[in-house]
Amino acid sequence: MRTLRQWHWISSAVCLIGMLLFTVTGLTLNHASRIEAKPTVTHLTLQLPPALTDELSIPDDDKAPLPAAVSAWLEQRLPTSIGRRPGEWSEGEFYLSMPGPGSDAWLSIDLETGFIEYERTERGWVSHFNDLHKGRNTGPAWQWFIDIFAVACLVSCITGLLLLQMHAGQRWITWPLLGLGLIVPLLIALIFIH
């Protein structure tokens, strides 16, 4: 009993803030069409110096990053990090898609002329948190966090259920309420979702 309570309160404490955030973002996702968003679009054009344009040649792998010197030059002039992200190389063009939570960005370089186009669309903080909720364009660290958080929630729910079972003898309403928590979503799904 003591071990069960410890597992329950520790897993619940670990999950508390995350559950609050996931609950709020669940509501914002459910009502996304009612929440007005005004995307901000940044569009920039640049000209790559001829010496750097000469470094742009289609690699053997059509999914490869830009040469380090080109990437460093771009990072000094653009409000984003290019790093060693692989882009798409095709005849005459390098294209790099850079989606992120609540945003989308792309970069296009004409391999012959060195003409650069960059565009970034920011969809606001609600969209940012909604994408974090879904794990969309968040990277492996956030996806690991979501998985660990889900396991902690599972531990909290299972230990809570076992504690309910232990105390159900003194609380007659325990099983009817638990059944209601199962039956209501089931009925809504069967009757109203088609």
Image: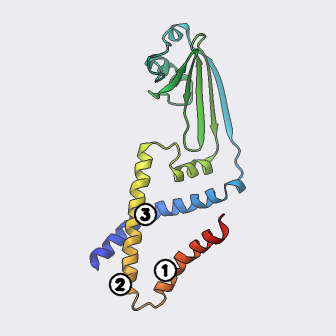
Pointer 3: residues within 10 angstroms few (<14), some, or many (20+)? many
Residue 61 is situated, as x and y percent measured from the top left of the image, at 44, 21
Q: Secondary structure at mark 3?
A: helix
Q: Which residue type does callout 1 highlight?
A: Leu
Residue 23 is situated, as x and y percent measured from the top left of the image, at 55, 63
Please state if 188 lies on the left or on the right of 136 as rendered. right
Q: Which residue type does callout 2 highlight?
A: Met
Q: Secondary structure at mark 2?
A: helix
What is the CA distance from the residue labelled 1 to the residue labelled 2? 14 Å
Q: Which residue is mark 1?
A: 178
Q: Of the two numbered discs 2 and 3 on the same chain, state the one appearing first in sequence.
A: 3
Label pair 1/2, CB-CB below 8 angstroms = no
Please state if 148 lies on the left or on the right of 28 as rendered. left
- Which image quarter holds the N terminus? bottom left
Q: Of the two numbered discs 3 and 1 on the same chain, state the one appearing first in sequence.
A: 3
24 vs 56: above or below:
below
43 vs 142: above or below:
above
